[in-house]
Image (cartoon, coloured by chain):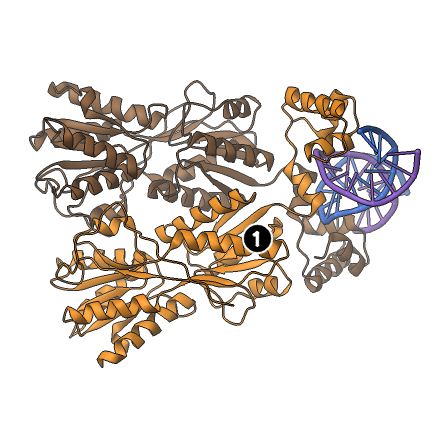
Chain colours: A orange, B brown, C purple, D blue
DNA sequence: CTGAAAGCGCTTACAG
DNA sequence: CTGAAAGCGCTTACAG
């Protein structure tokens, strides 16, 4: 593979001059520029990004550690992140934690070793020492979706509280009184917050959330399956199951179907995170939609602000309820399939 | 951030010795090793992967260029690739082409500039000059899922021919005679092969595949929507639509639902690529399942073989039909939700 | 077993 | 405008 030396030799200039034309440094004679460009062309030369990174101490790369690639929500987030990063001149390397703290740490370490310019992470737990150390050491970092309390890092996320209130009102209006939740890990913010918000939303209706109706999941499908089976085995099973993410909702559907039961007649189902397939399930699933694309964009902008020395603020965008048929009688006209994910307006809150 | 020099100073040895203990070189005295390890520990030192890569001319990184991250098939493939690569000591950087040749080239170039040790690609078109040049220049490369004819690069893919024959038999058995296909881009192998296999499978039944029943899609949801609308507008619409991937099947469902029609009564639907949601759609979708995990694993092994100087063979694994209810009366007992993706035995064919 | 030195491919003050 | 030189953080023959 041709190096800068080869180009310099072919163009009859020094490597310094080659480097200057490659970096559009102004002081290069038109003649030299022309000859360098010709040499670059004929040799098919491409600067070695590894060498450049070593020298400039920047990789123009962002690390993104997501909780689970198989979760369409994170997949959409990752796509949005890459898109925005590319537009701003950065590449992104994705690490999939698969909801495992050890795998998360593996990727954080790997990304740090590769000297990414900054880290976007949606933590799978309450805070690995490694990540805390990185944050303290000044590694540019931004949390997306989930965050770690007490760490001074901007957070870009969606607030589901209002949407969960809307969901509970919807459920109550349909006559449901025994409501259960499949929670994510308590060590994650989204895991504990969604339970808290659910409980708070139930209070005005004088509905309690007994322990038996809080199933401990891990945001993956298997746990949704397992927890739902437990609910169905109860002497008094819940009338509604609210899955704290779409994969656990998938697991719940599996469990319900395996027993030969039907949604919503035998048991109703709602989920956090809306995905295109929810329009086509039997029945269509009532879900809380996040402005995923916007979250990805905002997270990248915040991280790059941080990298480039500015001071980003945290961003919180609202989520909203999309009522379909999985909790009872069709409550609204059929959703247009063209816009299963209507974006809401954006809200910013100071960090 | 501490460098190897800091460690050497702290341990009272030369950087060469530090490097040796870091790379477990045998000739280091126990004493030196102990002191170096202590210094590494206390400084929280981590070798700079960028510098190491520059020096050793290897990054221990694989590039994976997939056609579309939003497609669960590719997402599952990517996960399997990363898993296997990690097990073999490699990292992977994913580039999402979003079915766009220009984006694909952007990522290939980016990955090459970063000096990945090898490239795994599922090409979105018939062959970008860039990729052909890279292959010719000797960049270790392996095609997954889709490939480019005439390029001497191993291919790891699934052969859907037999499964498509099974599908057609299934459809014919249910009484369907007017069969249409939503094809992928003709410039992709999976785009053209699936049409060819479908046509061949129809021949024994004396069923033709008229142009009006071949809709040109691009493997993304919108195109499935558009093509299906076209089919439904026909004077004689097809009785069955076979979508060449799961996203176009999603689009087809959108279009069918938007017209207030029902599957399979008004029109039947089948798809290439099985995904967990197909079990829960209304009705469950008959699909052709690929051994996705195995494909990812085999692709990584082939690429690493190539990188490490061995000579990998192409691998072709069989796909298989999973008949559900979207083409007519339930043809078999309900699938167990525990195993929506049963793996078939593995077949290897010489390259 | 150990260290001094060269060198990977770049960029960038510095001097001219 | 241009080039020689230093240096980024490593690894690895080479000599001892």
Q: Is residue A169 left or right of residue B156?
A: left
* Numbered circles on residues, count: 1
The residue drawn where x is 79% and y is 25% is: A13
Classify residue B245 by image quadrant: top left
**In this view of the protein, which residue sits in the foreground, A212 or B239?**
B239
- Label 1 SS: helix
The residue drawn where x is 47% and y is 65% is: A147
Q: Is residue A322 left or right of residue A84?
A: left
Reply above or below: B237 against A144: above
**In this view of the protein, which residue sits in the foreground, B234 or B113?**
B234
The residue drawn where x is 50% and y is 57% is: A121
**In this view of the protein, which residue sits in the foreground, B54 or A189?**
A189
Q: Split into 4 quadrants, where in the image is the N terminus of chain B?
A: bottom right
* Label 1 Cα neighbours within 10 Å, binned few <14 / some 14-19 / many ≥20: many
Query: Which x, y percent locates residue A264?
Result: 14, 61
Q: Residue B187: tell me if it is visible.
A: yes
Q: Mark 1 points at which residue?
A: A304
Q: Which residue lies furthest to the bottom in this view?
A: A206
Reply above or below: B251 against A229: above
Query: Which x, y percent locates residue B247?
Result: 29, 39
Classify residue B241 by image quadrant: top left
């Amino acid at each position: 593979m041709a190096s800068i030396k080869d180009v310099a030799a072919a163009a009859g200039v020094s490597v310094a001059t080659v480097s200057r034309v490659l970096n559009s440094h102004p002081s290069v004679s038109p003649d030299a520029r022309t000859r360098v460009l010709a040499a670059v062309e004929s040799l098919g030369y491409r600067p070695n990004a590894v060498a450049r990174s070593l020298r400039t101490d920047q990789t123009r790369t962002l690390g993104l550690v997501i909780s689970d690639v198989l979760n369409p929500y994170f997949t959409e987030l990752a796509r949005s992140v890459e898109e925005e990063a590319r537009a701003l001149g950065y590449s992104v390397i994705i690490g999939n934690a698969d909801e495992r703290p050890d795998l998360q740490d593996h990727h954080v370490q790997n990304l740090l070793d590769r000297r990414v310019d900054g880290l976007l992470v949606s933590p799978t737990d309450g805070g690995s020492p490694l990540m805390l150390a990185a944050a303290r050491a000044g590694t540019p970092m931004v949390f997306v979706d989930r965050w770690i309390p007490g760490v001074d890092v901007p957070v870009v996320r969606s607030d589901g509280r209002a949407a969960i209130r809307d969901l509970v009102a919807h459920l109550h209006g349909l006559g449901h009184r025994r409501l259960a939740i499949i929670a994510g890990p308590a060590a994650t913010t989204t895991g504990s917050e969604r339970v808290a918000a659910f409980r708070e939303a139930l209070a005005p209706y004088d509905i309690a959330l007994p322990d038996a109706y809080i199933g401990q999941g891990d945001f993956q499908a298997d746990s949704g399956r397992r927890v739902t089976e437990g609910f169905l085995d109860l002497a008094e099973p819940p009338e509604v199951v609210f899955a704290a993410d779409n994969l656990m909702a998938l697991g719940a559907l599996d469990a319900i179907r395996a027993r030969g039961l039907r949604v919503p007649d035998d048991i109703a189902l709602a989920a956090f995170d809306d995905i295109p397939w929810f329009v086509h399930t039997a029945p269509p699933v009532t879900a809380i939609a996040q402005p995923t694309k916007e979250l990805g964009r905002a997270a990248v902008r915040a991280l790059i602000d941080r990298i480039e020395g500015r001071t980003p603020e945290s961003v919180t965008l609202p989520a909203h309820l999309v009522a379909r048929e999985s909790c009872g009688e069709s409550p609204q006209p059929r959703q247009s399939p063209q816009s299963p994910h209507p974006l809401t307006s954006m809200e910013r809150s100071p960090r």
